[in-house]
Amino acid sequence: MIRRYSMPHGPFTICFTIGIWLLQQQTVLPDFVWAWLLCGLPFALLASTKTRWFRLAHALLLAVFACGLGFYHAAWQAEQRLIVSLPDAWQGRDIEVIGVVAELPRNHERGLRFSFDVEKILTPQASVPPHIYLGTYYDKQAKPLG
């Protein structure tokens, strides 16, 4: 009978979370070319675990796999989120849109912020995501109206 040693769910989850944390320390998103290296790790885990050194290597490979999986899963989620953003060419420019306020404004320390669903873009050749957040900012030097 061959006994397989695997990492319990707790350490796997901790290593996965460390991978997510490591991604958040990066200044740019990683290139996904390196993610293909993770595909080979599960096959390396099929190696014999008869000796103590193989069991240690097995646990270490599983930890590296969990960490890499968390890292690239978080990177993929961030990439999906950034795809639906305002293009750089339109940053800081006025764009006229028609839409609906999707939720009540929320107060924060510098102003108001609310969710807005875009129904129509009036500015020619402008590209706007279908769901945006708009905000107003308080000017501390301005006197209140009234």
Image (cartoon, rainbow, N blue to C red):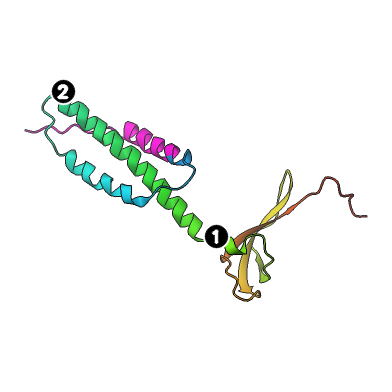
Quadrant where the image shows the N terminus: top left
Q: Dividing the picture into quarters, in which one does residue 88 lie? A: bottom right
**Quadrant, the C terminus:** bottom right
List x then y, in percent, for residue 143: 90, 49
Question: x and y percent of residue 27 in the render?
Answer: 49, 43
* Residue 4 highlighted magenta (yes or no): yes
The amino acid pointed to by label 1 is Ser
Residues 103 and 18: in front is 18
**For mark 1, what is the residue?**
85
Crowding at mark 2 (Cα within 10 Å: few <14, some 14-19, many 20+) = few
Q: Where 125 sits versus 63, above or below?
A: below
Above or below, comparing residue 80 to residue 74 in the picture: below
The residue mark sitting in front, 1 or 2, is 1
The question of residue 93 being in magenta is answered with no
On residue 52, the disc is 2
Q: Residue furthest top?
A: 52
Residue drawn where x is 17% and y is 43% of the image: 43
